[in-house]
Image (tube, helix red, strand yellow):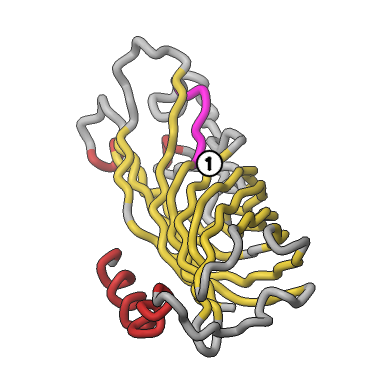
Amino acid sequence: MRHIWLLLMALALGQPVSAQFNEKPILNLQNEDLARFNWGYFLGFNQYDFKFEYKNDLDPTDILVSKSFGFNVGLIGEMRINEFLDLRFEPGLFYTQRDLGFPGFSSESDAIREVSSTYINFPLLLKVSTRRLGNFKPFVIGGFGAALNLGSNEDSPDDNSSGTFRMKRQVYNYEIGFGVDFYLEYFKFSPSIRGVFALTDELLRDEDPNSPWTGNIEAMKTRGIFVNFTFE
């Protein structure tokens, strides 16, 4: 999937992007960054993971996480502060799946838990850019956000003893990344790579305090990486 996205990006850019690095390029969209407010949307892919903290680190029961690629889609609202700073709100939908492997079980139905998550993310970000260089402009971006996990199973009366892995619906996180704005003939195209890190514990524990699935877990926090392709 990653190779397909890279191919699509290369086809989308084509000759216009290579022209950005000419010694004296023809400047595209010269007034693009002068507006007080700007709008756009993004598409992309992600790979999420979990970071586990254990109550008993000497107990060799580390949980294995099998990761897969998911997808991102969302909208962008941007407020210009000055030439180098922009405040951005990027609400989006992020779908991902992680499979958890718990040691010590002989049955696969007990040892494997499929965790499918659909996050609706609400990040408030600060974008810090360099001065525009011809038709491109590098930037770094970061901020904080809240997310709702629609696949959390928080309201389920069942837990792992019945085969249901439960998580908290609401999670807070921070995000940091970097990218480049490319000023094409008709729109601004901005690929970026981001890291997201949960600030709060997401695990909803089983009723049994000695549960073999959740009893030794001190905290479970999402961490992940995603690539966005922004069109403005």
Residue that lies at the very extreme toward the front in this rendered image: 23
User: Residue at image x 41%, y 63%?
Assistant: 45
Name the residue nearer the viewer: 203 or 231.
231
Magenta residues, dominant SS class: strand
Q: Nearer the viewer, residue 201 or 191?
A: 191
Q: Which residues are magenta?
A: 217-222
Residue 89 at x, y percent in the picture: 69, 62
- Furthest residue toward top: 58
- Where is residue 79? Give x, y as percent: 76, 66
The answer to whether residue 116 is magenta is: no
- For the N terminus, which image quadrant? bottom left
The percent position of residue 195, horizontal first and vertical second, equals: 48, 48
| Mark 1 lies on residue | 197
Q: Residue 221: say if magenta.
A: yes
Relative side of 106 to 157, left or right: left
Q: Is residue 167 depicted above or below 201 in this figure?
A: below
Q: Quadrant of the C terminus?
A: bottom right
Residue type at the position of mark 1: Phe
- Element assignment for label 1: strand
Query: Badge 1, how many Cα within 10 Å: few under 14, some, many 20+?
Result: many
| Residue 32 shown left or right of residue 179 in the figure | right
